[in-house]
Image (spheres, rainbow, N blue to C red):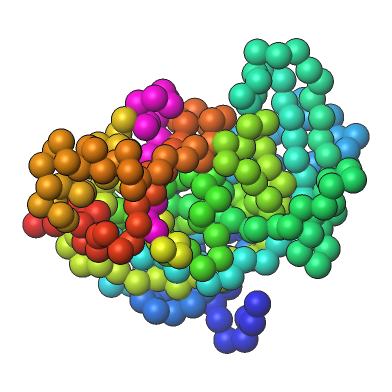
Amino acid sequence: MCVKQMKIVHKDKGVYSFSRFHKPVEYVDLGEPVILETEDAVGGQVKSEDTPLEKIDWNRVNKATGPIYVNGVEAGDTLIVDILDIDVASEGVILVVPGAGALAQRSFKPKAKLVKIRDGVAFFNDVNLIIKPMIGTIGVAPEVDAIPTAIPYKHGGNLDCIEVCRGARLYLPVSVDGALFAAGDLHAVQADGELCVSSIEVEGKILLRFNVVKKWKPEWPIVELGDHYSVLVADEDLDRAVEIATEYVVQTLMKAKKWSFEEAYMFSSLGVNIAVNQVVDPKKGVRAILPRNLISIYDLLNPCQ
């Protein structure tokens, strides 16, 4: 990652909530690349596998570097975030914590495991995993006063979506001028679901570039990656999240293709995939995946007066 003459936002400049009341730590122009340094999700508190997890300060987790004020972006716009590159450190950590994760009802011991990373590979016991670095927490100031960084919602937040990776373009709804963007919580490897409550949590650097769609914005975050768009939805109830995501894409198909509800709903069984981002946050996350050759990004956005 080339850092020459780029703005760098250091990892000590971060927040634990997305809020319109946070003061910007940096100002960036549209099209200007910027580097964000990030802590790991537990704030570097786990130094060894013997670290007592009960001593972790859970008020210091999920720190997001920022916020950044993006010049030229106003409330009612869509912030475009191009993820140009992600570098991760040579070691990460994965945790299991009693009472957390998809098997929260099971009885088990708290455990931390340090995972070495070298030459694009993470070494977990006798299994070598090709890394695919991603951004777990990424978003803008919400419509409400503040939302903790650990919670995913319409503004972004703790999305834990494996598609928020190098080469992706993220569309976020802007509620305040400048957007007040922040990001952190990098994962070297994560599977859909993030079942045990964490993945390979790692510090690192993100290279980003911003753009804007004026006076249009999505209801929920959208990722553009490869040949498809993904609509990212979160709710306390996983079934409800699927319902919201399905309704969103059905309405999009009705608008884009001039189809009836019945036709668009039928097609959702043929050309729309639903995937689970994570089942471990206060709000569970899913994504509805649509082929890009069917629609344009404007079909997924709503005009703002």
Which quadrant is home to the N terminus? bottom right
Q: Which of 197 and 138 is in front in this view?
A: 197
* Residue 118 against residue 260 in the figure, above or below: below
- The percent coordinates of residue 94 (x first, y second) are 75, 40
Q: Foreground: 86 or 18?
A: 86
Image location (x, y in percent) of residue 70: 37, 68
Does the segment drawn in magenta span residue 241?
yes
Q: Is residue 70 above or below residue 101?
A: below
Residue 142 appears in the figure: no
Q: Is residue 98 left or right of residue 284?
A: right
- The residue depicted at 81 percent of the width and 67 percent of the height is 119
Residue occupying the point 56% across, 54% down: 135
Confirm whether residue 298 shows in the render.
yes
x, y percent for residue 108: 78, 17
Q: In this view, does 287 lie to the left or right of 200?
A: left
Who's the residue at 64% across and 46% down the image? 190
Image-quadrant location for residue 89: bottom right
Q: Examine the image and state in which quarter residue 98 appears.
A: top right
Q: Say which quadrant the C terminus sits in.
A: bottom left
Measured from the top left, where is residue 125 in percent x and y? 89, 43
Going by the picture, which residue comes out furthest to the bottom? 5
| Number of numbered markers | 0
Which residue occupies 51% across, 56% down?
164
Residue 198 to residue 22: above or below? above
User: Bounds of the magenta span?
Assistant: 228-242
The answer to whether residue 182 is magenta is no
